[in-house]
Image (spheres, coloured by chain):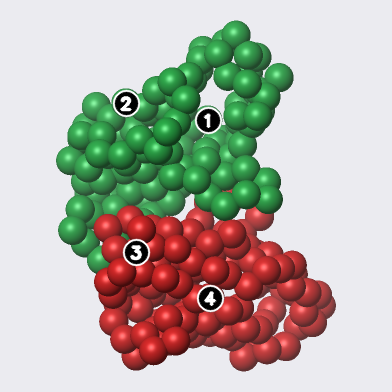
Amino acid sequence: ETGVTQTPRHLVMGMTNKKSLKCEQHLGHNAMYWYKQSAKKPLELMFVYSLEERVENNSVPSRFSPECPNSSHLFLHLHTLQPEDSALYLCASSVVGGGGEQYFGPGTRLTVT
Amino acid sequence: GDSVTQMEGPVTLSEEAFLTINCTYTATGYPSLFWYVQYPGEGLQLLLKATKADDKGSNKGFEATYRKETTSFHLEKGSVQVSDSAVYFCAPSDYKLSFGAGTTVTVRA
């Protein structure tokens, strides 16, 4: 595997389900990000982890819970979601103090029914 | 934080036409500037970047020049192909990226 991978690529879940999104980066980076991309809205930064510590949480509802067990892996735990949470969830990684560029995974297309 | 204003789309072009997507930003410092591209069904890919004033980033026939005096970073390509159909995002970065709304470009054969 190369770059940033995300699983699953597609997920359909009911509002009472609990599921997790997984992201893995194979680039040797030490910062990781979760973004939400909804139709006709700008990309929304949700969480930032730097050196495995959460450094940013942009007023994300508690039904989204991130976890970063090491610098290569990032999870987004989902529970009691709402239909408006349906979106493409993108993971990205970068080097702390690097040139600023981030490398993105292909995303997980989430549908909440 | 930084913010960006990007030309609204959608933009529809014929093959071999000239493409320009305008991007202006506001920033307190001197951010690095990026263009990302998102092809259908995929994540964002870094297209090009520039890190200081007057730098020109280029990749795949696309170019953009860091203009500090006009706080702009317009994307250009001289002859587009159908495969350039995608959504393009301008993003300044001081310590994190600030994305524009994206411009959808469709190139017709």
- Name the kind of residue labelled 4 in the image: Cys
Of B86 and A59, the residue lying toward us: A59
- Name the kind of residue labelled 2 in the image: Glu
Between disc 1 and disc 3, the foreground one is 3
Dot 2 corresponds to which residue? A67
Dot 1 corresponds to which residue? A8
Q: Residue at x 68, y 89 (%)?
A: B18
Mark 1 surroundings within 10 Å by alpha-carbon count, few (fewer than 14), some (14 through 19), many (20 or more)? some
The chain that hosts pointer 1 is: A
The chain that hosts pointer 2 is: A
* Quarter of the image with the N terminus of chain B in it: bottom left
Task: Please say if B41 is above or below B82.
Answer: above
- Name the kind of residue labelled 1 in the image: Pro
Label 3: state its secondary structure: strand
- Distance between mark 4 and mark 2 Cα atoms: 35 Å
- Distance between mark 1 and mark 4 Cα atoms: 34 Å
The colour chain B appears in is: red
The colour chain A appears in is: green
